[in-house]
Image (cartoon, rainbow, N blue to C red):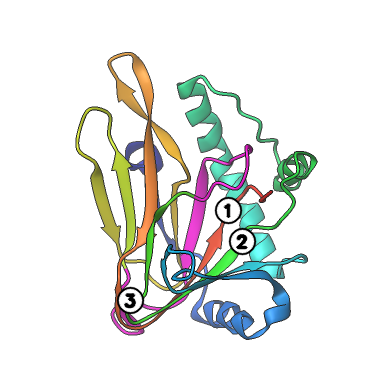
C-alpha cells in the first residue's frame, strides 16, 4: 500500500468541480469559521487559513467521517509496528469525544488560501496530546490553469541520513492522504519512526485553495 511505502497517497477525484466551488464559497461566510490565521504575521509563511467552527458544514463533516473510517486501519497498523497505544475507536464521533474529554474541543478542519507569492512553512499539525497519525488535504483549484507553483511539500527526516523531500501537484477535487507526525519505516530492529513535516511551495501566479481535514481536535 502506498501509504505504508511512502507515507502519502494521492487519490482519484473525491469531489466534483461544483463541490469544490461550493466549498470555496464558504470563505465568504465568516460566521462559518472560529479563527482566521495570517501566516505572515505568525511567521508560518504567507497566505491565510481559517478553522471551521461548529457546526461543521455537511460536506466537511461527511468527508471527515468517511476518511477517518478509511484511514483508521492504517493508523492501527502503524501503531502496532511502533509498539504504541492505538486509542482510535471505530467511529470519528467516538474519537472526537475522547479528544473533548481531554480538553481538545476546538474543531480543526480548515480552508487554506494562497495568492501569488504565498507559501507555507514546513510544519506538523499537532494540537494537543491526542493525535491521529494521518490527515487529508483536498485541492479546490486546478494546478496549471487556476495557479502555477504551490506544490504540496513533504520532508521526511530519515535516521542517520539526509532528509528526503517530495513535491506533489494536487489536482482539483483529488485528496492527498499523508503523515501527520511520523510513520513506521523498516529498520534493522524491525520498525522505527521517521518524522515528516509538510508545507506548500511558493505560488507563482493565480489562486490556490484547499480543504484540510485533521482528525483530532485542538486544545
Q: Outermost residue, top direction?
A: 189
Q: What residue does disc 1 label?
A: 214
Comparing marks 3 and 2, which lies closer to the viewer?
A: 2
User: Measured from the top left, where is residue 114 in percent x and y?
Assistant: 42, 76
Looking at marks 1 and 2 on the same chain, the residue that comes earlier in the sequence is marked by 2
Asked if disc 3 and disc 2 are in contact, CB closer than 8 Å, the reply is no
Classify residue 176 as left or right of residue 143: right
- Disc number for residue 109: 2
Classify residue 56 as left or right of residue 36: right
Query: Which SS type dominates the magenta stretch?
Result: loop
The residue shown at (55%, 80%) is 24
Looking at marks 1 and 3 on the same chain, the residue that comes earlier in the sequence is marked by 3
The quarter of the displayed image where residue 91 is located = top right
- Disc number for residue 143: 3
Comparing marks 1 and 3, which lies closer to the viewer?
A: 1
Q: Quadrant of the N terminus?
A: top left
User: Measured from the top left, where is residue 151 in percent x and y?
Assistant: 31, 66
* Crowd class of label 2 (few under 14; some 14 to 19; many from 20; radius 10 Å): many
Q: Secondary structure at mark 1?
A: loop
- Closest to the observer, 21 or 113: 113
The residue shown at (80%, 40%) is 101
Q: Is residue 138 magenta?
A: yes
Q: Which residues are magenta?
A: 125-150
* Crowd class of label 3 (few under 14; some 14 to 19; many from 20; radius 10 Å): some
Amino acid at each position: 500500500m502506498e501509504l505504508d511505502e511512502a507515507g502519502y497517497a494521492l487519490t482519484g477525484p473525491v469531489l466534483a468541480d461544483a463541490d469544490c466551488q461550493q466549498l470555496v464559497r464558504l470563505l465568504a461566510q465568516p460566521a462559518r469559521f472560529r479563527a482566521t490565521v495570517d501566516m505572515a504575521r505568525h511567521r508560518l509563511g504567507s497566505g491565510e487559513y481559517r478553522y471551521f467552527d461548529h457546526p461543521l458544514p455537511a460536506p466537511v463533516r461527511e468527508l471527515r467521517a468517511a476518511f477517518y473510517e478509511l484511514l483508521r486501519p492504517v493508523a492501527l497498523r502503524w501503531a502496532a509496528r511502533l509498539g504504541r497505544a492505538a486509542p482510535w475507536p471505530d467511529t470519528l464521533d467516538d474519537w472526537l469525544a475522547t479528544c473533548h474529554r481531554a480538553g481538545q474541543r476546538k474543531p480543526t478542519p480548515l480552508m487554506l488560501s494562497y495568492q501569488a507569492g504565498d507559501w507555507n512553512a514546513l510544519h506538523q499539525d499537532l494540537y494537543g496530546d491526542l493525535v491521529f497519525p494521518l490527515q487529508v488535504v483536498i485541492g479546490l483549484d486546478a494546478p496549471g490553469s487556476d495557479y502555477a507553483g504551490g506544490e504540496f511539500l513533504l520532508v521526511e527526516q530519515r535516521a542517520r541520513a539526509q532528509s528526503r523531500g517530495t513535491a506533489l501537484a494536487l489536482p482539483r477535487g483529488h485528496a492527498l492522504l499523508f503523515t501527520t507526525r511520523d510513520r513506521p519505516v523498516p529498520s534493522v530492529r524491525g520498525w522505527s519512526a521517521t518524522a515528516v513535516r509538510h508545507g506548500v511551495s511558493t505560488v507563482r501566479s493565480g489562486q490556490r485553495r484547499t480543504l484540510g481535514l485533521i482528525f483530532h481536535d485542538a486544545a
